[in-house]
Amino acid sequence: MDAKATIERENPNVVAHPIPCRRARILDCCCNRVWLDYSEESDTVCAVPKVG
């Protein structure tokens, strides 16, 4: 996934975690994690990535 690679290349201090859109995620906040919502049908990002 290009977005995951771009995020991790631009900020090596974070790890991007791809999650299908509108799926549940862990509720604890972690400043070295980026949630990457993507569409399973088109394999594109469907929401602005968020630290958490």
Image (spheres, helix red, strand yellow):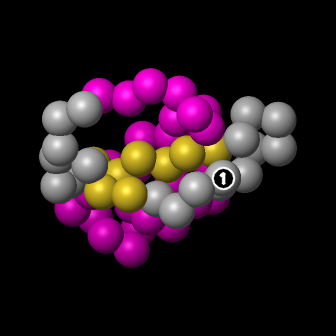
Q: Which residues are magenta?
A: 1-26
Q: Is residue 21 left or right of residue 17?
A: right
Given the current orientation, which residue lies at the most extreme right position?
42
- Name the one closer to the observer, 43 or 1: 43
Position of residue 2 in the picture relative to residue 18 (left or right): right
Kind of residue sitting beneath label 1:
Cys
Q: Quadrant of residue 25?
A: top left
Neighbour tally class for label 1: few under 14, some 14-19, many 20 plus, Cα within 10 Å: some
**Residue 5 visible in the shown view:** no
The residue sitting at 17% across, 55% down in the picture is 31
Number of numbered callouts drawn = 1
Q: Which residue occupies 26% across, 49% down?
A: 52
- What residue is rendered at 44% in x and 64% in y? 7
47 up-or-down from 23: above or below: below
- Nearer to us in this view, 28 or 41: 28
- Residue 6: horizontal and vertical position, in percent? 51, 66
Q: Farthest bottom residue?
A: 10
Q: Nearest the camera: 49 or 14? A: 49
Question: Residue at (20%, 53%) from the top-left corner?
Answer: 32
Can you identify the residue that label 1 sits on?
46
Residue 4 on the magenta segment? yes
| Residue 40 placement: quadrant | top right
Residue 45 sits above or below residue 19 on the image = below
**Residue 9, how many percent across, how many down?**
41, 67
Q: Is residue 34 magenta?
A: no
**Tag 1 secondary structure:** loop
Residue 14 % position (x, y): 27, 57
Quarter-of-image position of residue 21: top right
Decide if residue 46 is in sight here. yes
Q: Is residue 33 left or right of residue 16?
A: left
